[in-house]
Image (tube, helix red, strand yellow):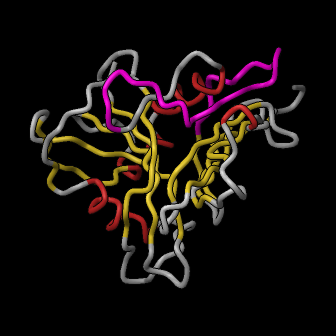
Amino acid sequence: MAVVHRTVLKPTKLELLGAWLPSRPWYRGAEDGPRLARAGGFRLDDPEGEVGIEFIVATDTSGPRPATYLLPLTYRGAPLDGAEDALVGTMEHGVLGRRWAYDGCHDPVLVAQLTALIAGRAQAQDQGISDTPDPEVTASHTDGTAVPADLADAADDRDGTVLTAPDGATLRLHRVLEPAGDAPAPASDETPAGAVGHVTGAWETADGTPARAVFAVLRPGAGA
């Protein structure tokens, strides 16, 4: 179980993300940087208890219209070998000391737990309270369809990030979230057409309106 510490971070997570976001192809904000506010998110537990896993949802009001981003991060007590290009930045944690924050799509611990969430082997946790499930996050996969455990090679494009398995299966994370009309009850979430699994979550828009959207979609590879 991940413990959520009430402490000070220097710089803050949003400050780190504000400096990093303009380098992403899916960034929609102003050239001189975003104006970010937290809008939602959730956590996943690392079974080994070593890596913090957080999916931050933040709204940027710097552009011509607000943009809401899905920002998966991992927090580590030491650098992740071979992941220099995925480093978002470092920060000083009031309890844990120096932490290295990574774009979680490039961290195998986050990817493994995200696929476990889709497969029903992991449960989304509240972003701000220890040992508390988040009922706003729903996940599913098609019965009898294996969820690949070897997704890697994360690549960004204009719409988000895609991870690919050797058999061609893909997991796409929607980095710019668009509300799906009125926020539906979690039980009404449906797997998108052509997909074999997905994750849906919730946040609040800039005016405080509840919103929901698909965060991640798993599509089958050859022979599935």
State left or right for residue 153 relative to residue 2.
right
Residue extending farthest right: 223
For the point 53% across and 19% down, the residue is 122
Q: Nearer the viewer, residue 217 or 190?
A: 190
The vertical placement of 20 against 53, above or below, is below
Query: Magenta region: which residues?
Result: 128-152
Q: Quadrant of the N terminus?
A: top left
Q: Residue at x 71, y 41 (%)?
A: 217
Q: Can residue 164 be found in the magenta stretch?
A: no
Nearest the viewer among 205 and 157 is: 205
Looking at the image, is 50 positioned above or below residue 194?
above
Taking 141 as reference, is 156 left or right? Answer: left
| Residue 102 in the image: above or below residue 158 | above
Compare residues 218 and 178 and report the one nearer the observer: 178
Image location (x, y in percent) of residue 222 = 86, 31
Q: Magenta-highlighted stretch: main secondary structure?
A: loop
- What residue is shown at x 14% (from left), y 41% (from top)? 7
Residue 84 is situated, as x and y percent measured from the top left of the image, at 35, 48
Residue 146 versus residue 156 in the image, above or below: above
* Viewport quadrant of the C terminus: top right
Q: Position of residue 194 (x, y in %)?
A: 87, 40
Relative image position of residue 148 (x, y in whole percent): 68, 24
Q: Quadrant of residue 139?
A: top right
Question: Residue at position x 52%, y 22% from top?
Answer: 123
Q: Is residue 143 magenta?
A: yes
Question: In the figure, residue 211 lies in which quadrant?
Answer: bottom right
